[in-house]
Amino acid sequence: MNLPSLLLIIQSLTLLLTLASPILHARVTPEQAEATFKQLYANRLAAVARTAQFTDNLELAKELLTAAIQSKKSPQFALVLARNAAALASKNPTGYATAARAWQIVAEADPANMLKHKAAVADLTRKAYAHARGPERTQLAPKVITAYKDLAKLYLDAKQYDQAVVAYQVAYRQALALKSDTVPSIKRNLDTAVTAKRIHRLIRVEKTKLKRDPKDAKAAKQLIHLYLVELDDPKSTLPYTIIASDAPTRQNINLTKTPLNTLTETQVIQLADWRLQLASTATTDRSKAAMLIHAYRYYTHFHDKGSSNAFLNSKVKLARARVQRQLADLNINIRPTNSRPILNTSKTVVLKLDGKQYTFNNHNAAIDRSVSPPILRFYKPNAHLLLPREVTPSFVNKTFSISASVKPTSNNGVICARGGMRHGISLYLNNLTPAVAIRYDHKLYAIDTRQKLPKDKFSKLKLVLTKAPAIELYLNNKLLGKKSLPSLFKNEPYQGLQIAADTRKPIGQYKAPNHFSGRIKSLKLTFHK
């Protein structure tokens, strides 16, 4: 890069900081971001368009990429910068690596279209690797593996199994060529994707049969097996138990929804034996392992709790040992209850709310998926999850409920919040007592309680915004308080949904960010019809 070009970049970045500083740390609309971008870069883009040298395009693309990285706290502005950087850099193979980095920022700024953007990242990374030579090629090789692994996972989440298989195949071939340590894990993931593709093809076949004949019991029984055993999805199984007149399976599925501690000894053993029997019908090691793990957990619960019936104790002890041996044959070792959990600390966390999957930005939180339901752990400084406003479901003119089971280690902290001091709602702890704050046009409506939560076990909290309109607060299904409201939300709360913090202007009478410390599980957001 020559000196005039370097000076031009410095001048442009200075202009960026001067003109765009009001929006670099604030949320702006797409229109505002586009207008600011044009004000800053319209002349530069026109100048680059007039030159035949790609080096000018690449220089400006790298400058826009640097600006996008500096603007991440304003996602819409970062999005515009990164998209333009990608468009400039992708015009020539020498710019593919820069374009891939730009699309990565686009993906982070626009999580609602994560899959499409990650596909661009993977494609450009692969093209950059194919074109590169020497040290640059060596550096890009593992990035191709990572890009296609990430893309394959997103395809699986989206239930696009054909594409997931293709993406894993690319990652697997690249890992083999590099003799990478990741070969075994990618091969396992590829096998899983291939199996999922096969099973969902079978599901489509059986559903077609049922469409032709809604009383086809044989097709219904096959769907029960595919959903229940091969996919470990009891919820999707239920409708077919009626067609197949399979009352025992329907009864057991309904029992699995019951909290474990409330089941009788007979019911616990019934579910354990049922899962063990299902394991014998599994067609893959993965599905067999899933059924055996369910059986093991039921047997272990019975074993740890103990029984006055010596015969049942002996039976469960033998059955649990048999399950352990079968799992060992599958090279699966059950994690002891006193060992450390396997935690996911990735930059994003996918949670299911109101029947849909949402991708939260993860700030220092961890999720333990080795237990069911998964547990969100907030122990590190500033740990919280944030769902960007652009993808947070609308609260306007809607009634809804927010519930979660919490096990706090701190006395204070926000469990779930959306909005700010103008419009917003927050469920939080105040000296270990549950509280709710809701704001309409800055006016605060609050519920404060006196019943303290224990720190040694989970407690279920639930707030409900009713048609009355009113806000209700429950602890372990017991009503703690109720507050009348002038209306439902007439305006959209500005900030997105947050878990374990209220990071901007506080909704309640506490200081932001009011981080929650402890564990949260079974988080639900449900809109009422």
Image (cartoon, rainbow, N blue to C red):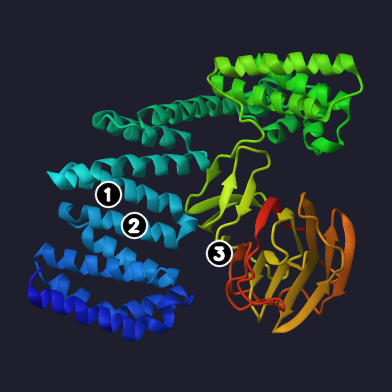
Taking 186 as reference, is 33 above or below it?
below
Q: Nearer the viewer, residue 238 or 360?
A: 360
Q: Of the residues shown, which amino acid type is indicated by label 1? A: Leu
Q: Position of residue 39 (x, y in %)?
A: 31, 83
* Left or right: 207 in relation to 480: left
Mark 1–mark 3 Cα distance, whole angstroms, equals 35 Å
Q: Of the residues shown, which amino acid type is indicated by label 3? A: Asn
Q: Considering the numbered disc 2 on the image, is that residue within a helix, a strand or a loop? A: helix
Q: Considering the numbered disc 1 on the image, is that residue within a helix, a strand or a loop? A: helix
Q: Nearer the viewer, residue 33 or 416?
A: 416
Q: Position of residue 174 (x, y in %)?
A: 28, 33
Taking 335 as reference, is 270 above or below it?
above
Residue 124 — which label? 1
**Disc 2 designates what residue?**
103
Instruction: Give the crowd class for mark 2: few <14, some 14-19, many >=20 residues within 10 Å.
Output: many
**Disc 3 designates what residue?**
382
Name the image quarter holding the C terminus: bottom right
Residue at image location 69% in from the left, 57% down from the top: 409
Residue at image location 87% in from the left, 70% down from the top: 482
Mark 2–mark 1 Cα distance, whole angstroms, equals 9 Å
Callouts 2 and 1 close, C-beta under 8 Å: yes
Callouts 3 and 2 close, C-beta under 8 Å: no
* Left or right: 91 in relation to 102: left
* Left or right: 191 in relation to 221: left
Q: Of the residues shown, which amino acid type is indicated by label 2? A: Trp
Q: Position of residue 263 (x, y in %)?
A: 86, 33
**Badge 2 or badge 1: first in the primary sequence:** 2
